Structure formats: C-alpha cells, structure tokens
Amino acid sequence: MRVPYVFNIQRFSVHDGPGLRTAIFFKGCPLRCPWCHNPESQAFEPELMTSPDGASELVGRQYSIDELVAEAERDVMFYDQSGGGVTFTGGEAMAQDVGYLAALARRLRSRGISVGVDTCGVAASAAFTRMAEQTDFFLYDLKFIDAAQHRALTGASNALVLKNLELLNSLEAVIYLRMILLDGLNTGWDVIEDTMLWLKTHGIKLAGVNLLPYHRFGMDKFARLGREPVEFRTPSPETTHKIQQQVARFYECVTIGG
C-alpha cells in the first residue's frame, strides 16, 4: 500500500458536500487545468513553493490512516449537527493508492463519519468500483463534453471521465455533478445543451448539479511555484443564471456554487 501525500486538511468546509466537512487534499492529479485553484496539488511528490511572505516551504507530507482518522474525529460533533463528514479531494483523490483510500474510508465510516469523494473522473475504473462501496457520495467534475476541447485545455481525453460517470451511475452511486463555467469556452447554449443531452441520453441520475463560475482564487500560487498563470473570464451573473435555468430543464436541483 503506497501512502499518498496530503498538502492540506481544511476544517469547516461548506463547499465539499453536505454539511460542515473536513476536506483532505491529496497531492497529485493526472490533469493540468490552467485554472486550477490548487496548482500545488498537481504533482504527486512534495515540492517547494514560496509562501506569501517570501519564504520557501515544502508542500506535501504523508499521513498514516490513524493520523487522518484522528484529525477527522476532532470535528465529529460538527458533523453530527450539520450532516457533514469528510471529503477526499485534491489534486485527484481517485488517482491515489485505492487500497489506502478504501481503508481510510472504511475506518471513517465505521465511526459513523460520512465520506465523500471529489473527482475529475480520470482514474482507473476498478478504483471507482471499489470506492463506490465505501463512499456516501461523489462530487463529479465534468469540465467539457467535447473530447478535443477537454484534451486541449486539461491535457487528457474525457473518454475515461464519461466512462467512469456511466460506471458510477450503474452502481447507483450518489452523484453531484460539478461544472466549472469558463466564459466563452463552455458557457454557450449549444455546449450546455449538448452536455445535458448526453447525460439524459445515457440515463445519468444526479442528486444535484453545481455550477461553479470561474474565479481567480489560487492564481497567485502559480507564480509562487515559478509557473506562469493563465487568465480566464468569469461569466456574468446573468449568463450563469441563464445556464442555471437551462440545466433546470433537465435536472431539478441546480445550484450556483457548492
């Protein structure tokens, strides 16, 4: 079992699933999204990053399962009051050692702690099959329905993304679809319509859809890693609201943010 690296443990998160949650950020992702809010999550190994005050800091450390369970158990009273729990995120949680993830999820759930997984879908299908047994819900990112656009902007095909979404659906997993909105790239009426029609044609059942307008949070981190940030545009509130209305024709629970 390979112990993955973690670069952040965020308490009292309200954007990583239902209720107050502890988000465990695993280091390493197969995609290279230039809008990534956590570019320090992309490499699988620890790396040096300049802190806001100019000092160098090593990002990423290994935690045993016992350590992470102990971290989560500090907030059990908040989970109980809010219906929250722990969310595995990153980076890409599903690209980590699935034996480690499954064991961690099993330990947490044995203590009555809900477990969610935030994923871009680019991971082995066998890992999704295994984790579906130990996970209460998935936050599933669908960035681009067009294969060429997905490859051009993330560095990888969306074939596995769509395949694993169908797989989780067949396993009757609870799925919240997350759609980042990049103005002028995936906010057009035709793009949204094509995405929704694909989902409906393939019988994808969703507990909800979260629309995530692009924001610049984390852009300074690219410079602190010695990398050049790329600017994107945030859709206007009017555009985002229209997309919400469009998606609501297909799925009832559509929220902005989340």
Image (spheres, grey):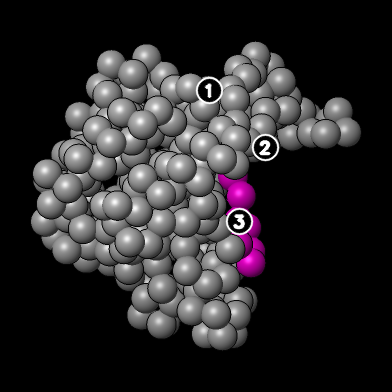
Q: Nearer the viewer, residue 176 or 69?
A: 176
Q: Which residue is mark 2?
A: 217
The residue positioned 26% from the left and 52% from the top of the image is 250
Choose the circle earlier in sequence order: 3 or 2: 3
Q: With 106 as the anchor, is 38 left or right in this view?
A: right
Choose the circle earlier in sequence order: 3 or 1: 3
User: Judging from the image, what secondary structure is the residue with disc 2 in?
Assistant: loop
Q: Evaluate whether residue 82 shows in this view.
A: yes
Q: With 204 as the anchor, is 4 left or right in this view?
A: right
User: Judging from the image, what secondary structure is the residue with disc 3 in?
Assistant: strand
The residue positioned 52% from the left and 56% from the top of the image is 258
Q: CA distance from mark 3 to mark 1?
A: 23 Å
Contact? badges 3 and 1 (CB < 8 Å): no
Q: Which residue is mark 1?
A: 34
Q: Evaluate whether residue 37 shows in this view.
A: no
Choose the circle earlier in sequence order: 1 or 2: 1
| Residue type at the position of mark 3 | Ile
| Residue type at the position of mark 2 | Phe
Q: CA distance from mark 3 to mark 2?
A: 18 Å
Q: Which stretch is magenta?
A: 7-13
The residue positioned 27% from the left and 24% from the top of the image is 146
| Residue type at the position of mark 1 | Pro
Q: Decide: few, some or many residues near mark 2? Use Cα within 10 Å; few <14, some 14-19, many ≥20.
A: few
Q: Nearer the viewer, residue 90 or 217?
A: 217
Secondary structure of the magenta portion, mostly? strand
- Residue 128 within the magenta-colored segment of the rendering: no
Q: Decide: few, some or many residues near mark 3? Use Cα within 10 Å; few <14, some 14-19, many ≥20.
A: some
